[in-house]
Amino acid sequence: MKIAIIGFGNLGKTFASSFIKSRFIKNDDIQVITRTLPTPEMTFGIPMGNFQHTASSKIAEVDILILATKPQDFEEVAKGLKGLISSEQVVLSVMAGVSIEKIKEKLQVEKVIRSMPNLSTQIGLGMTVFSASVETDRKDLFIIQNLINTTGKSIYAENESLINPATAVSGSGPAYVFYFMNAMIKAAEEFGFSSSEAEVLVHQTFLGAINLQSASNLSNEELIVKVASKGGTTESALKVFDTHELDKIIAQAMCSANQRAIELGA
């Protein structure tokens, strides 16, 4: 199986590295189109000759084309690819907001899979939601899901309209967690802990909580009750969250992210 990756930023590099580490794809079978050619140590073993600034007729040889460019660059990228790819090739997009129909129209292809991975794909713990055009058959979907799963877990959504909300939930989600962690670290420092002590306190708290939640059959609400005893310190903190309606603020923020994803695809 041969693959071409268009764009060699964080996601492009993640896919190349994950495919090769999993031995799903051979180094020689990956082509990369990128504005900036990498140094030899950043090729993950892909031959330097497989890196090009612009697409060439070699693109016609690949089975799967991965669009890992910024959504705002898609129009320009599409111009460079048009006429070089065929309707038999599968196109996998990781661009936020760009619809399946728009990709089909601009590239004149039929088999298009649109996905939304997140930052944790870089360490093999990613979450990706993907959807596909009706022309994409089960075999293609099976292959693509196996490729995606080299970077973590995935969910197939029959309805493409769920991709934008997935962007708001899991795509942007790691930043929400980092934001909350940062706020807790700053508060710990205000209490008198050193910067390094505050980092350890918060990091281990999040790590333990995530693993506890993963290992437990209890719901999040039930786990909260286990921590928050009546009249205790945790209950006092939760009352502040409730007073300021933190749950609604989080929901509003996610709605804003969803709306921006829609705008990017317009």
Image (tube, rainbow, N blue to C red):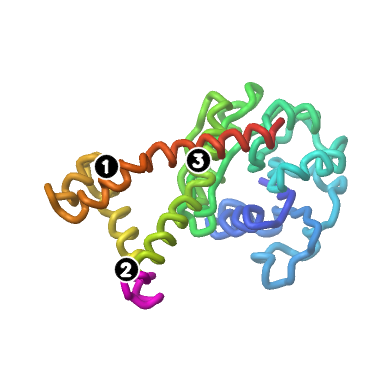
**Where's residue 19, x and y in %?**
58, 54
Q: Secondary structure at mark 1?
A: helix
The answer to whether residue 203 shows anywhere in this view is no
Residue at the image point whose x is 26% and y is 47% from the top: 238
Q: Amino acid at mark 1?
A: Asn
Q: Which residue is mark 3?
A: 253
Label 1 vs label 3, nearer the camera: 3
Graded by Cα atoms within 10 Å as few (under 14), some (14 to 19) or many (20 or more), the crowding at tag 3 reads some
* The quarter of the displayed image where residue 84 is located: top right
Residue at the image point whose x is 19% and y is 56% from the top: 233
Residue at the image point whose x is 18% and y is 44% from the top: 225
* The quarter of the displayed image where residue 142 is located: top right
Instruction: Assign the C terminus to one quadrant of the image.
Output: top right
Magenta segment, which residues?
189-200
* The quarter of the displayed image where residue 93 is located: top right
Q: Which residue is mark 1?
A: 220
Q: Secondary structure at mark 2?
A: helix
Q: Give left or right: position of 220 versus 48.
A: left
Q: In the figure, 31 relative to 97: above or below?
A: below
